[in-house]
Image (spheres, rainbow, N blue to C red):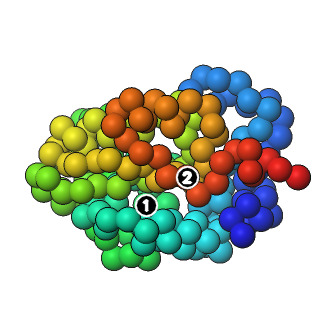
Amino acid sequence: MLENALKDCGALRFGEFTLASGEKSDYYVDIKKASTRPDVLSVIADEMAEVLDSGPRPDRVAGVVLGSIPLATALSLRTGIPLLMVRKERKGHGTGSTVEGDLGEGMRVLVVEDVITSAGSVISAVKQLREHGAVVDTVLTVIDREAGGREALAAEGLRLEALLTASRLLQK
């Protein structure tokens, strides 16, 4: 279902792309495009909620600004679990916090990501959450590009749950 939704909305594209990790790729999965479509975002939220049903319920769902915020928000709405937003950099105004939302010491936080390649940005977000007292042990992503991200997360004591792998999405 999710594979078809991503393909039908044009989120899977072929060509020459530079990924956030700096790596080159002949395909790109534009989850931001998919998440702007209510029908596709609903499918993603439903599938993420199903993953949550199979394990311990987190106290908070966190998304990293900007790409995973719609995903985390949709999951929060679907499950009733409060939302956190993690900034990549401290803002120069307001509270200056890198984590927005109510987070208490020892709360279990599920981090949501759109696509995992090397996992560098999500590892940075997890470190920020942990600095704020969160307990983070799982990252839930829409796509695992199977490019070392799972191993990088494991080295940080994190388990990766993926709705889809790149190899499955790319099957004809």
The label on residue 72 is 1
Name which residue lies at 74% across and 44% down: 167
For the residue marked with disc 1, what is the amino acid? Ala
How would you rate the neighbour count of disc 2 (Cα within 10 Å): few for under 14, some for 14-19, many for 20 or more?
A: many
The label on residue 137 is none
Name which residue lies at 64% across and 40% down: 145
The residue under label 2 is 162
Residue 137 at x, y percent in the picture: 32, 47
Residue 41 at x, y percent in the picture: 59, 68
- Residue at the far left: name it: 105
Label 1 – label 2 distance at C-alpha:
14 Å
Residue 17 at x, y percent in the picture: 73, 31
Residue 155 at x, y percent in the picture: 39, 29
For the residue marked with disc 2, what is the amino acid? Ala
Left/right placement of residue 40 relative to residue 97 reads right
Left/right placement of residue 72 relative to residue 169 reads left
Q: For residue 74, say whether it is visible.
A: no
Left/right placement of residue 16 relative to residue 156 reads right
Viewer-side residue, 116 vs 86: 116
Element on which disc 1 rests:
helix
**Depicted 50 relative to depicted 9: above or below:** below
Quadrant that contains the N terminus:
bottom right
**Depicted 64 relative to depicted 52: above or below:** above
